[in-house]
Amino acid sequence: MTLHGDPAQRLETYRRLEARNRIVAILRIGVPALGLLALVSLIGQIYVSSLGSRFGVGQIAVTPDNIMVEAPEYTGLLDDGTAYRISASAAQAATEAVDQVGLSDAALTMTRPDGVVMTVDAAAAMLDTTRQLVVVKEEADIGNSLGTKGIISDSVFDYATQSLVGNGAVTIDYADGTHLVAEGMTYDAVNLVWTFTRATVTLPDTP
């Protein structure tokens, strides 16, 4: 910018600076406002999808691009009386897709009315609040309080239909020593039915 231009040039320069200052002032208010709007939208999405359930969080941080939530916890009750709990060490959602919540150290616990507890743990998962799904693309550890343990890949927990689907490899070791390997599985939490695809079962030795 030259300080020796004619009055018309100086006026034009002044107007450009004035316009820039107005934009900066708007951004100073607008960027935090957009972050707040995204946060409200995220909480609204979760609230609508969790009517009759409970959702809790720790600290919340908002940036222009992301929303970070510390220690989220989502609990509810299935129609058969099974209580479920979805938790994580942290959750993150992009401001342009607040219904897709990334979970770190995700854990699902389902406690049946008869006291049997089933668990699913994964290093990372995605909570889809619109479709009411928890998606684990990589491996997840599963188990129950009866001694069954296993690993499933590419799994989806649908808490609307109350089902857990493993679209990838499945390995399960039962408490009695039975070993099962399958290419996929479905667990119907309503009827307590396990269905396996192309399964191979190895029974324990008997006396």
Image: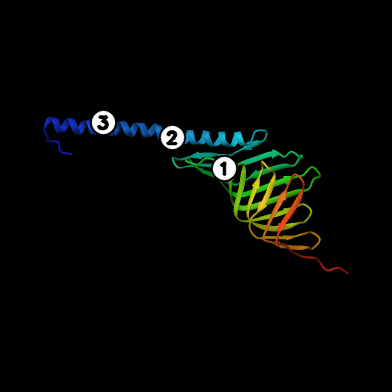
Q: Residue at x 77, y 44 (%)?
A: 112
Quadrant of residue 12 within the rendered picture = top left
Q: Is residue 21 above or below residue 124?
A: above
Q: Is residue 171 above or below residue 96?
A: below
Q: Is residue 33 above or below residue 73?
A: above
- Say how the picture is coloured: rainbow
Q: Which mark is residue 131?
A: none
Q: Residue at x 74, y 53 (%)?
A: 194
In the shown orientation, is residue 119 left or right of residue 68?
right
User: Mark 3 Cα within 10 Å, few/some/many (few <14, many 20+)?
Assistant: few
Residue 26 rendering spot, x and y as whole percentages: 36, 31
Q: Which residue is mark 1?
A: 70
- The C terminus: image quadrant: bottom right
The amino acid at mark 3 is Glu
Foreground pick, 70 / 102:
102
User: Mark 2 Cα within 10 Å, few/some/many (few <14, many 20+)?
Assistant: some
Residue sitting at the far front? 198
Residue 22 rendering spot, x and y as whole percentages: 31, 31
Q: Residue at x 69, y 55 (%)?
A: 185
Residue sitting at the far right? 207
Q: Which residue is mark 3?
A: 18
- The N terminus: image quadrant: top left
Compare marks 1 and 2 and give the one earlier in the sequence: 2
User: Mark 1 Cα within 10 Å, few/some/many (few <14, many 20+)?
Assistant: some
Compare marks 3 and 2 and give the one earlier in the sequence: 3
Q: Which residue is mark 2?
A: 32
Distance CA(mark 3)–CA(mark 2):
22 Å
In the shown orientation, is residue 36 left or right of residue 162?
left
The amino acid at mark 1 is Glu
Residue 30 rendering spot, x and y as whole percentages: 40, 33
Mark 3 touches mark 2? (CB < 8 Å): no
